[in-house]
Image (tube, rainbow, N blue to C red):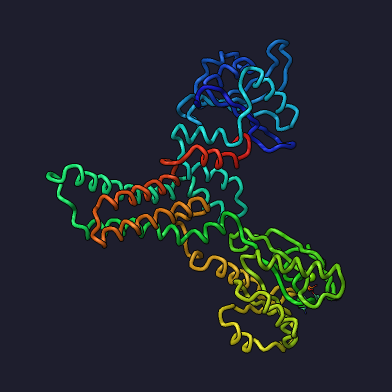
Amino acid sequence: MFGQDTIAAIATAPGEAAIGVIRISGPSAIAVAAAIFHPASGADVARLASHRVYLGEIRVPDTGEPVDQVLLSLFRAPRSYTGEDVVEISGHGGPVPLRRILSLVLAQGARLAHPGEFTSRAFLNGKLDLAQAEAVMDVVAARTDRSLGVAIRQLEGRLSQVVRSARDALLPLVAHIEATIDFPEDVPEMPRADLRAQIEAAQETISRLLASAHAGRIYREGARVVIAGRPNVGKSSLLNALLREDRAIVTEIPGTTRDVIEESANIRGIPIRAIDTAGIREPGDPIEAIGVQRTLEQVRAADLILVVLDASQTLHEADQEVFHLVHGEPCVIVANKCDLPVRLDLNGIRAEFPAAPIVQVSAVQGTGLDQLDEQIAETLLGSGVELGNQALVTSARHQAALDRARMALQRACETLDQDLPLELATTDLRDALDALGEITGDTVSEAILAEIFGRFCIGK
Ligand SMILES: Nc1nc2c(ncn2[C@@H]2O[C@H](COP(=O)(O)OP(=O)(O)O)[C@@H](O)[C@H]2O)c(=O)[nH]1
Ligand SMILES: [Mg+2]
């Protein structure tokens, strides 16, 4: 199906830039380029050597009208991103020259690429496995250095390697059991305890990956951190302090933040959406009532809630109301205004909420913010803070597949324990192999592929 038509797209972001790139891939990529590209050297485009860059001009074929001065890079199959002949034209990065060049390319018989089609061809031609192909999108979308690091490692194949090692350990077991079924006289059964030990080892590998999924998801998708508290405790000031800039409106009049303000921040490498909310209390007027309602919605959707208290005052009834609202959610208690004499009974709060860490800060003076960052990261990631360079599971798809694999292996172990026929265990082992194969793309349906690559943008 693939390898027939030649696809093309603008591969760079829209808008004005120094350079813009048009990517062409497929059997006629070089012929398309030959029709419109005139090397400054006068060389024959069809004969240009692979993996070189050429200076020249794009011209309209019929009229010879010059369109742009460009650099053309040539990659002959199979040594290219997609595994097909690939030509990349680097032109001036304006919308008009790029669209003009693209339309000339399309007029030569290439068709516009679908979203993710370059990368899906790379996958289908064995240049990348599926987890690597998915990582391409994560690298582009990364919002912090840590997120980028996680995505790059997946692109390098770190996750795939671990998944493959589990698959490779299981494959010979299936082969062995099937041989004992087919040739019961010739192939003696491996002791069940040995079989079980090997399945358990694979299960162990899978469990270790699954344990990284929470941190992995947070690095890839970011975390929603909601700042909650009664009016005037310094929520908006804290948002500004977290961002190290002034964005939310700060005033001395309680109830100033009536709507929800959302900002991006990078806290210890975690991409954060920090959400400032209206204070929680008995609403004074209808507009504020809407704000309080939105706060409640935000609290429910949060990955973490910063419960802000005014340390210069004793605990209010409204603070208790806040505690009540966030009950059961992951929280960090922030005792703000610690530059003022502290009247808040911190030990009392600690006794009442032993699970929630308390951090003392002054949003205005900027003290305690490092400890707060630390506590936010620790509460969000748990043990994941220490994951270092290990392969992380970042996508819900991978997590679901690993879960299925782990449960299938669990069933296989139960079959062995109950002394049921080994044949029954092969079904479960095969289920586990299929689930693992869905991550790397060794076993995956067309529908899943279409779903994954459909999320890419055109040109990738
Ligand atoms: N002394 C002191 N005042 C603060 C601190 N944080 C906020 N404030 C003051 O408390 C008032 C309310 O702050 P704001 O951020 O608007 O509170 P919000 O209603 O919870 O969003 C303002 O006058 C701030 O300047 C702090 O750390 N120390
Ligand atoms: Mg506010």
Which of the 4 image quadrants contains residue 7? top right
Q: Can residue 80 be seen in this view?
A: yes
Q: Which residue is drawn at 76% across and 77% down?
A: 230
Q: In this view, does 345 lie above or below 293?
A: below
Q: Which residue is drawn at 58% across and 36% down?
A: 116
Extreme residue in the front direction: 420
Residue 252, percent across and down? 85, 76
Tally of numbered tags: 0
Q: In this view, does 389 lie above or below 92?
A: below
Q: Answer with left or right where residue 410 lies relative to residue 66.
A: left
Q: Which of 333 and 246 is in front in this view?
A: 333
Q: Which of 75 and 411 is in front in this view?
A: 411
Residue 81, percent across and down? 51, 33
Q: Which residue is drawn at 70% across and 77% down?
A: 322
Q: Which residue is drawn at 63% across and 89% down?
A: 348
Residue 250, percent across and down? 82, 70
Q: Answer with left or right where residue 345 lies relative to residue 177.
A: right
Q: Can residue 338 be seen in this view?
A: no
